[in-house]
Image (tube, rainbow, N blue to C red):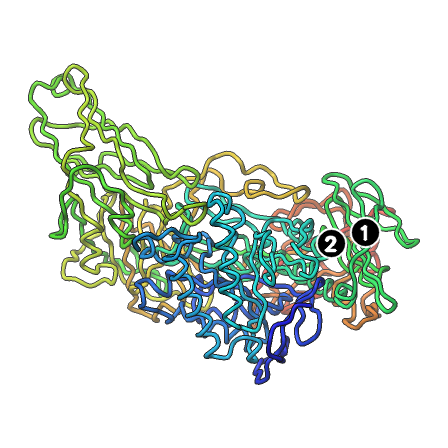
Amino acid sequence: MVRFLIVSIFVAGMAAATAVVGVNVTYDHRAVVIGGKRRVLVSGSIHYPRSTPDMWPGLIQKSKDGGLDVIETYVFWNLHEPVKNQYDFEGRKDLVKFVKLVADAGLYVHLRIGPYVCAEWNYGGFPLWLHFIPGIVLRTDNEPFKAEMKRFTEKIVSMMKEEKLYSSQGGPIILSQIENEYGNIDSSYGPAAKSYIKWAASMATSLDTGVPWVMCQQRDAPDPIIDTCNGFYCDGYTPNAANKPTMWTENWTGWFLSFGGAVPYRPSEDIAFAVARFYQRGGTFQNYYMYHGGTNFGRTTGGPFIATSYDYDAPLDEYGAPRQPKWGHLKDLHKAIKLCEDALVATDPTTTSLGQNLEASVYKTSSTCAAFLANIDTKNDANVNFNGNSYHLPAWSVSILSDCKNVVFNTAKINSMATIRRFVATSVGDELMGSNSISSDWSYVSEPVGISSNDAFNKLGLVEQINTTADQSDYLWYSISADINGDEPFLHDGFKTTLHVKSLGHVLHLFINGQLEDSAIGNSGRPGFTKDISVVLKRGKNQLDLLSLTVGLQNYGAFFDQTGAGITGPVELEGLTNGSTVDLSSQQWTYQVGLKGEALGLDTGGSSLWVSGSPKSQPLTWYKTNFDAPSGDNPIAIDFTGMGKGEAWVNGQSIGRYWPSYIAPTSGCSACSYKGPYSSSKCLRNCGKPSQTLYHVPRSWLKPSGNILVFFEEIGGDPTRISFATQELESMCSQVSESHPLPMEAWSQDKSTKRSKSMRKPRISLECPHPNQVISSIKFASFGTPQGKCGSFSHGYCRSKNALSILQKACIGSRSCNIEVSTATFGDPCIGVVKSLAVEASCA
């Protein structure tokens, strides 16, 4: 057993963790050991800056209610030190407050300091000022980089120690991480990579935190660092030393959304299958990445082209609501795993074959026994014999037998209810709409085309954008004039000439003589582009203004920090006299970093430049209006349908980039089965539609009235089409068969795993999300062979005639109801057939 100094006790699971005595955190080959006891731990990632402090307590409590033991978060260097030696830990950046709130809920913390985080976060979490340190090379055995990495890591560790937040001090932090997924790309750095990793491990352990350190995706992690797995599946992972536990630091609950892409999702049955397989094969620490994804406020997205929504199809959605049935199904899974905890930590599993693609893993001692029966076939169900009993295993599923006899959970059979949540929009056009209205009094400021700042500069040739802007703005103007002689043929024959532009990305808007001529965009897979634009030029001087934009900086890959952006050339005018081409690339250009509106602080709504009106289809326009906060306490979004691309602010705080004009491909959204290996492109929705139209507005940013919405529109749209939307529960559903396991509530939490006498059959449960709501209607009920899914159920070839009336009597007027799925309740409409009960209800 590897030991870390200082003895301690932090009691996770208490309503309020006010620990005053330290807890010794160690590990051995089976598990993380807390206070001398091996633990099976379920963890989930919540990134504190992707939500707001007023959301944190609710997110943490819902995580605890969902069965988590640990909250995992990265630490975002560029958020906390945007300027060297100038730190910011206020508001959404208050890391200490977040960690203390986790402790208050009685949960542990895994603090992933990095300080490289990836996380689809701008520049991978590194502050851009690192890029300008002479001689620096990031993430390798480079002295300037190591000095800065050590300084920031020491800063974070010192903050945690000062607040007594490590478990060794009585706090909630039981694990820390140094570096991040370096093993995926370390070969690109040659021999220096190994010496760098050894240095990073030594530096981290020298900080004497009293808790273990991990490195994810790092097979050569030096002792005593634990190497861990990231991925959609980690059931085949083994650590690099026999004395280290098997840990899964990132189980991807879905995938991130990119502007221009369809929306990915991961079926609940598949992620439950992956988790059960991991614990079946010997794992004892598993973390969901993400458990709550949240929102990329401001300009924090990386990629490039990562969307503002970081929902990730997580168990808690972007706005903090449980995503059902995923949240509930995993909650049941966690309960089942906890029923097995004594067996899981006591011994290693013994795995035997039950047939082709069928296996049983048993954890057995003289006093306890737990078994996992797995069918990893992607198509065929199976019946297996185990310990003298017969069990039915659906394809791509795992059954958990907490006493080696009774099935308490199967990953493919969902007992949890499902919900359909919709955003209900309120028009914000020219009519006032009560308390949810945006004022009809719009005002605007036109952003000048081209150079308008005294800080503009001239330079021969083209400049790289990131080195020029230092990421202080998304925008860089490239401006040049072209003199056209009167004998050019296109001036007489009506033809256009062509401007050929090559850019490293990410977006380009071309203005000719003050008018938007065309735009060019890259994508998440290929941010750079080459564009031939037909342009109309006049005799004499023509002004060419090219507005180049970034959409988040690269955050992943070897030497990602060296990836450039902007117009690198060539820039050529083609189709001139005798078909000649003029190369403008090496000529003198004028450059301006950022927009005039940014310099004037228009994002706050200030300035005397605003004029009344809401011009439509006008590029480079700042818009402003006032609005009252929508009533109630449901989450709020702004629907930017009708606009093109830009950034928006509410009361001076950026809700992020919006881009509803970027449409996802029309193909790829076919029916998706949970069966078989998952990939980020397997399950998609929203094909042929905007990648994102709804943008989260935290309620804590709003006043009851007199709020200010400002947004900068790049390409033109109709601001009067913008609407508020509040998240509402449209329906809740449940579909449970006679063959489902009993509800988890039927099994006691003691070591004997006894069945509750009050629950002998499967049951459906429905519950309205808010305490002041009751079930107001039963939209559908069928016991027999119902078809479809929540929102589109239909009756099958056999059904009970009294199902609807029974459900109405049991449920309407109550906040929740619980109905046994059996012929004793509904009669038997088709003898000899396994029947299901499907219900859809609404709340009011």
User: Label 1, on which residue?
Assistant: 351
Query: Residue 113: x, y in percent?
Result: 48, 63
Query: Which quadrant, please, contains the N terminus?
Result: bottom right
User: Label 2, on which residue?
Assistant: 281
Query: Residue 626: x, y in percent?
Result: 27, 62
Please identify the residue farthest to the right as the structure is shown. 388
Query: Which quadrant, please, contains the C terminus?
Result: bottom right
Query: Residue 262: x, y in percent?
Result: 48, 42
Closer to the N terminus: mark 1 or mark 2? 2
- Asked if residue 63 can be seen in this view, the reply is no
**Residue 151 in the image: above or below residue 658:** below
Q: Amino acid at mark 2?
A: Arg
**Residue 485 in the image: above or below residue 733:** above
- Asked if residue 683 can be seen in this view, the reply is yes
- Badge 1 marks a residue whose secondary structure is strand
Q: Residue at x 62, y 51 (%)?
A: 790
Q: Quadrant of residue 765?
A: bottom right
- Badge 2 marks a residue whose secondary structure is loop
**Residue 141 in the image: above or below residue 366:** above
